[in-house]
Image (cartoon, grey):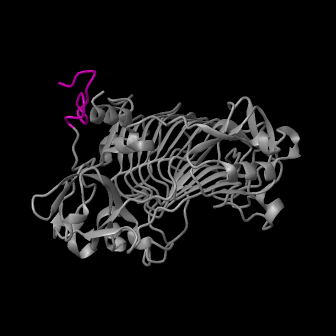
Amino acid sequence: MVSPGSSALYGCSGERWDNSRLPFDWSYAGYASGEKPIPWVSQSVDVKSFGAKGDGRTDDTWAITKAIDAARQGSAVFFPAGKYVITKRIDIRKQVVLRGAGRDATTLYFPHSLADVYGSRGGWGHGTCFLNFWGWNPVKPGVTYLARATSGYAARGSRQLAVDNVGRFKPGQWVRLVLQDSSEVFRSVLMGNKMDPGWPKAAAPGSNFLVRFSSRVKSVGPGSSITLERALPWEVKQQWGPQLHAVKPSVVDAGLEALTIEFAWSPYKGHLKEDGLNAVMFNQMAQSWIKDVRFLNSDTAVYFWGVSFSTVQDVEIATTKPRSSRSSDFWGGLDRQGHRGIWSEFGEANLFTRIAMKVPFVHDFSVATAETGSVWSNSWGADLNLDFHKGAPYANLYTDLDLGQGSRPFRSGGAAGAGPHAAAYQTFWNLKSRQPLTLPDAGFGPLANYVGLQTRESAALRVGARSGAGAFPQDLYASMKKKRMGW
């Protein structure tokens, strides 16, 4: 008999967790692998010292850019209370934090769209934003390469690997295991033989390293072996070309905090017709964050590309008044207020928590190409949409979410030719809504886990599905972290 503080799948403190069916430990997601709180970094510059007015009328773009350029690495650029007008893109390529005096006190105000400034009407549905944090987190021979894994075969859930150059490893070192033959791994292991021809070789540069996994080295030896701290989430075969690389991000400990980002109000123009009211992009950042930020009237609020071990928390996405757009396309009939709330792809082990999606976008929370090991927790939306945008996002966790109306939880987009919407091990744990949920059909993606959901169908007919009012623990991520950290 299972007690109220226990469950058949998890037990009281994870002792029933079955790595053969739920093979991932999500406790490492987020800043500092969930082991340290987001830091409060010291302030080195104040934008008003560089001429910014914050009066809601003066263009402060030049002054803000100069303040960021002058900021000391590892410090904060402070925006005192006020409304700062920004009219062009700001690109940040250093370890700095943009900090306001609180989201009810400091506003960064954007009166124009990217199309207004740079042209290409209706062509800003993806990519670049007004605030862009740029890093580099490579997997590159001659830069990060350490050794080949020579084990022949390592089972999912194992931790030990034989390597051809054991002298390059030491305990506590962060390494990234990559499989060069991504197409075969995706086809046979992660996508249930439903991968479209030509993918991922026709995808973006670096597609040969889409299957990747980061861990600290726990120990070196005996012999030519190393032992990883984390269990492998998938099997490793020699023919897949397994390599180990050092984790060397160029920018860490950067962020955005304690302010509001507001665009001048305009009606939402519709899906893939956006003029680019796009707020913040993190590109190949690591150990970074967005916290205590409000986004108003955006087409896209947050875009993560190739980001790892970073956190978005205490974020609100809303409008100053309705921007509703309706059309006769696939997304028609939705009271849409923007394109993407938060979008993450090519990333690993990110944490998105305490997000308030106050108005529905076309895609509220999106994951796409090869996003893996990330967590969406303790968040809510008016009618929350979890978009799986193809390209094989895999092993992401959605836990303790309030979907609001619950009319479109799994409605997903994505380009033709990129396989099913999701790859293996997407896990949905305690999602609630005001109406029973309709689970996606079998073509959505293989080996998904649905636990603690009220559904319209018999959960017994779905592999991995467990229906009910809730499952223990309420927040699977928080419980996993508590167990690992010994709290």
Q: Is residue 454 magenta?
A: no
Residue nearest the observer in this picture, 64 or 380: 64
Residue 164 % position (x, y)? 19, 71
Is the C terminus in the top left, top right, bottom left or bottom right quadrant? Answer: top left
The quadrant in which residue 118 appears is bottom right
Q: Which residues are magenta?
A: 1-16
Main secondary structure type of the part rendered in magenta: loop
Q: Quadrant of the image for the N terminus?
A: top left
Q: Is residue 10 magenta?
A: yes
Q: Is residue 115 above or below residue 204?
A: above
Give the percent coordinates (x, y) of residue 42: 58, 37
Residue at image point 79% right, 62% down: 115
State the residue in front, 386 or 286. 286
- Residue 270 position (above or below residue 456): below
Residue found at the very far right of the displayed protein: 57
Residue 38 placement, left or right of 326 = left
- Residue 124 at what x, y percent from top left? 71, 62
- Residue 17: x and y in percent read 23, 39
Q: Residue at x 25, y 55 (%)?
A: 232
